[in-house]
Amino acid sequence: MKTGSRALCTDPYWVGRPDCSHCAVRKSMLFAGLPEADLDHLLRPVDNFRYPPGVTIVRAGESPRAVYTLRRGYLKVQQLQADGKRRLLRLLRAGDAADLESLVDRPYPHDLVTLTEADVCRVPAQTLMGLANKHPELHIAMHERWRRGLEQADRTMLDLLSGEAAQRIARLLCFLDDFAEDGALPRLRRTDMAGLLDLTIETTSRVCRRLIADGLLTESGRQLRIDRRRMEALAAR
Amino acid sequence: MKTGSRALCTDPYWVGRPDCSHCAVRKSMLFAGLPEADLDHLLRPVDNFRYPPGVTIVRAGESPRAVYTLRRGYLKVQQLQADGKRRLLRLLRAGDAADLESLVDRPYPHDLVTLTEADVCRVPAQTLMGLANKHPELHIAMHERWRRGLEQADRTMLDLLSGEAAQRIARLLCFLDDFAEDGALPRLRRTDMAGLLDLTIETTSRVCRRLIADGLLTESGRQLRIDRRRMEALAAR
DNA sequence: CGACATGTTGAATGTCCTCAAGGTCCGTGG
DNA sequence: CCACGGACCTTGAGGACATTCAACATGTCG
């Protein structure tokens, strides 16, 4: 095993060097479309980690000089506000990338925290840029990741940060329902809902309780279920 | 003069093909750092426009398949909400780029409207990508434009869309003060302030009036001036 | 000067926040 | 097995704040 970029192998979450050419979700990942021949050799500096829920992967201000891509699970992108409140800026799911700021030599501006168990690959920015200059389609893939981030930021501003509390929560629940293509929508805590919607925990709790009472929402164990039709009607108002 | 991409020359705002190698603000533009030899030949399909305030350059959903770069003035990125309200997502200033979505073949998701008089270049996505594949530094420049957009979206969520009305307005005014490096900070209308901060026009008016009464803000003609120190103190709370 | 967009002001209403007190769930250790 | 602690959630009462609706003022441009 190499040292250098492998210094992290004391990291308890470190899994090893991923086998990118057999990655189960490669089609949705950054390296989709690249010829396999290049992958094995050039992606040697890539590391793979598996984290339990609630682990901070990167802290705001750190410069890991690497892009993280998410193979499985959900991540929270969060930041402390000046007044000390923890705000959630967006959620990442399988196929998304984080810390694209490394590509332009900027420290990561947010905290990156696992929401569920998560399987993450760490690609040094230098590796990525080197590979991209040989394979321009990789640049396109990176532009697409930027676009997704911005799209979600814009949707958050328009849908989740305006309107009344009940509407915001309804929109968030519909969003989570879409967001989890495979049906396993992440069960957010009240704190995280509140942090994403800029509401207090108390208001969030009150509204959720009312949704449950009215049969729009079911919380069983760590599963969420919604009455999609009625929830959308509430979200739309 | 060519036809094809020059079909727009009936556009009253069309100025002509820009002379990129002598662009006064080239250092801050996308093509900073490219060898001049390439520019003249390859940037032939680029068009230059000059718009008065209040002109819609691109409508949400259109696919101009081009990236717009702003040489002078300010642009509003706005969108109609489901409830019919006009919301402002961000402001662009000289050096920024819009419609980067064209790079990944997506229609532009927002309206793009001039706030002040503006000088805009229109670069077909194909031209840009072709050039970028020869000159990887151009990809970096595009990554940087994406980053700026996302950074501003994040700051908007944290600073402009939370807290009390007076704080939001104070933060916006400080932001505008930074934003306009050359001192010519764009004089937003009440409607635009309200649309950016998700407040009503009435609330915005009331708060601004109070700021003026307290001497934190001066509105003279189309100039704004703020008492930076006291405004920051208000913004921080 | 007149017309129309933009900005201002007031009073009443509703929503969300604050503060405070309890409740539930779950893992740990006696 | 049960008691305990801690994290998370729930509920209530009171008050602060932005919104709504309506009327009026100001400014700007022909």
Image (cartoon, coloured by chain):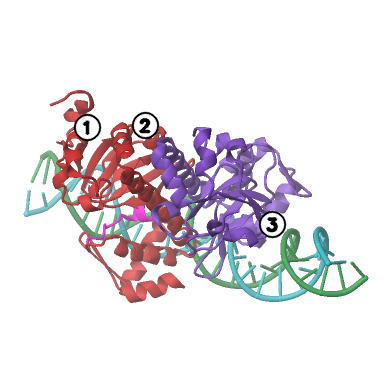
Chain colours: A red, B purple, C green, D cyan
Q: Secondary structure at mark 1?
A: loop
In three-dimensional space, the C-alpha distance between marks 3 and 1, rounded to whole angstroms, equals 57 Å
Q: Secondary structure at mark 3?
A: helix
Q: Indicate which label's residue lies in the foreground, 2 or 3.
A: 2
Q: Is residue A192 magenta?
A: yes
Q: Indicate which label's residue lies in the foreground, 3 or 1.
A: 1
Location of mark 1 (residue): A45
Q: Residues within 10 Å of mark 3 (few under 14, many from 20)?
A: few
Q: Chain of mark 1?
A: A
Q: Is residue A54 shown left or right of residue B138?
A: left
Q: Is residue B173 shown left or right of residue B98?
A: right
Relative image position of residue B219 (x, y in whole percent): 75, 48
Amino acid, disc 3 = Arg
Front-lying residue, A96 or B71: B71
Location of mark 2 (residue): A62
Which residue is found at the position 46% from the left and 51% from the top? B125
Magenta stretch, residue numbers: A184-195
Relative image position of residue D28 (x, y in whole percent): 80, 59
Q: Quadrant of residue A8?
A: top left
Front-lying residue, B204 or C4: C4
Report the disc number at residue A202.
none
Location of mark 3 (residue): B206
